[in-house]
Amino acid sequence: MRIRLCLATLSLIGGAAGVATVSAPTASAATCSDIDVVAARGTFEPGTLGAIVGDPVYSALQKKLTGKNLSSYKVNYPADLSFTSAAQGNADLVNHVNSQAVACPNQRFVLVGYSQGANVVDNSIGISSDGAVVGSPIVATIPAALEPRVAAVLLFGNPIRALGKSVTGTYQSRTIDFCAKGDPICENGGTDVLAHLGYTSDADAAAAFAATKV
């Protein structure tokens, strides 16, 4: 019930006017920047890259990664409650990274995922979100040859954490995974629905972490 309420609250936010107050980039593809920020928004989340996480994180990254040219890509997927939503995002994220890697041989990537978008990123780096809230089986993974070009993985309200899982292996040292106390999406037994909507405050910390990895 708490999880359904949390997702319903996000749906209401998605329909509200004037939610995205942070200046956001225009999502772009095939731009040979130094760093491509690939962001998967949460369920029903409004905004260019995501009003709660993607947009403020991108803004914070621009301030932290001085001297670096950044571009952005909004993962193209429904971000709804359909059974295949996260799987579609997983496929699109991997396809984007693959195509960018060919077009821009020197480009590196920062992956950003919030809520269902964290499931999308998890799957794309080989950590299955199957069984998690709005999760799915893995349908594609970033090839091993491209793993070194993923500079950082920034996750927020990650549903697999409620299953006792986390990012392990190759990407572990490059990953920061925020779960607010009481957030029912990422904390098993969490009861604070509003905690899931408060990750904007972690944007600077996430960007600071990414800056140490680029």
Image: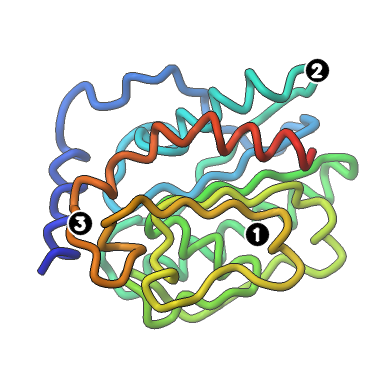
Nearest the viewer among 111 and 198 is: 198
User: Label 3 vs label 2: CA separation?
Assistant: 38 Å
Left or right: 126, with 118 as reference point:
right
- Identify the residue position indicated by label 2 in the image: 67
Point out the residue furthest to the front here: 181
Neighbour tally class for label 1: few under 14, some 14-19, many 20 plus, Cα within 10 Å: some
Among the two numbered marks 2 and 1 on one chain, the one whose residue lies closer to the N terminus? 2
- Identify the residue position indicated by label 3 in the image: 7
Nearest the viewer among 128 and 193 is: 193
Instruction: Report helix, strand or loop for mark 1.
Output: helix
Which-is-in-front pick, marks 1 and 3?
A: 3
User: Label 1 vs label 3: CA separation?
Assistant: 27 Å
Q: Quadrant of residue 169?
A: bottom right
In the image, residue 60 above or below residue 198:
above
Q: Quadrant of residue 188?
A: bottom left
- Identify the residue position indicated by label 1 in the image: 95
Q: Residue at x 55, y 60 (%)?
A: 121
Amino acid type, mark 1: Asn
Tell me where residue 23 appears, x and y as whole percent: 44, 17
Amino acid type, mark 3: Leu
Dots 1 and 3: beta carbons under 8 Å?
no
